[in-house]
Image: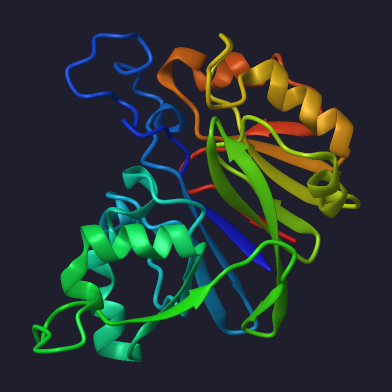
Amino acid sequence: MKVYFLGTGTSQGIPVIGSNHPVCKSTDYKDKRLRVSVWISWDGYSCVIDCGPDFRQQMLSSNCPAVNGILFTHEHSDHTAGIDDIRPFNFKEGAMPIYAHRRVIENLKHRFGYVFETVNKYPGAPSIQINEVRNNQPFIVGNKTVIPVDVMHGDLQVFGYRIDDFAYLTDVKTIEKEEILKLKNLKVLVINALREEPHNTHFNLKEALDFITLVQPDKAYLTHISHIMGFHEEVQKTLPDNVFLAFDNLEIDL
């Protein structure tokens, strides 16, 4: 299984529009972060987790030839606003299966009504197949079992996903003990770490590192990173040996 980090930034991305922060002015490609998303592929199957406003650019940069499904973590725009750009995949492969909590599906119907229209639908509109995700109900994508992991983003429920020995969680602030049990014996954990200072709805760096210590994956990659975290290379030097700042276009093999 291959994991390709399409984007590792926050809702604003890095550089932030109009910002003079030193990280936003950095020339290091690892300090340039699109909105958070990941592409996972195995045995001829290809899916992405989240489809944000940079989706088109991410597909072009990664040379992704096909997407067979989209797993949504939650409804915030930095995770969903690229849904219109699935159309080229529709033209090649037909309707796109999407997997999401019922609340997220209803939110997408409200915001992207033309995508879900069933009567007099515009011929060029995106085409989808809806699959509702429920906690404690694993489901199949490709030939693999996906385990939903229920977490909280402040007061908002969010799904993380485990596939084999890989788990991807973003926008986490709290997680119950029974959900943590779903994350044992991982080879790779991807977890959000916004910045060093505390935040109301996201793990900061200390919280992410404490969580990694609790779960004990072989390796962990931090994502959903703000420019306030600091320069990539400087932050990386402070991390434990098995913890890495993810960066856009990083690819790992499991």
Give the quarter of the figure containing the C terminus: bottom right
The answer to whether 217 appears left or right of 25 in the picture is: right
User: Above or below — where is 75 with respect to 95?
Assistant: above
Could you tell me residue 193's position as x and y percent?
A: 59, 27
Q: Nearest the camera: 94 or 39? A: 94
Q: For residue 230, say whether it is visible.
A: no
Q: How is the image coloured?
A: rainbow
Residue at position x 72%, y 37% from top? Answer: 175
Residue at position x 62%, y 25% from top? Answer: 203
Could you tell me residue 176's position as x and y percent?
A: 78, 39
Residue at position x 68%, y 32% from top? Answer: 174
Q: For residue 61, say whether it is visible.
A: yes
Total number of numbered discs in the rendering: 0
User: Above or below — where is 26 with respect to 79?
Assistant: above
Picture quadrant of residue 205: top right
Residue at position x 71%, y 78% from top? Answer: 144
Q: Nearest the camera: 13 or 153? A: 153
User: Above or below — where is 178 with respect to 153?
Assistant: below
Could you tell me residue 9's position as x and y percent?
A: 43, 34
Could you tell me residue 247's position as x and y percent?
A: 51, 38
User: Above or below — where is 61 with respect to 211?
Assistant: below
Picture quadrant of residue 171: top right
The answer to whether 59 appears left or right of 40 in the picture is: left
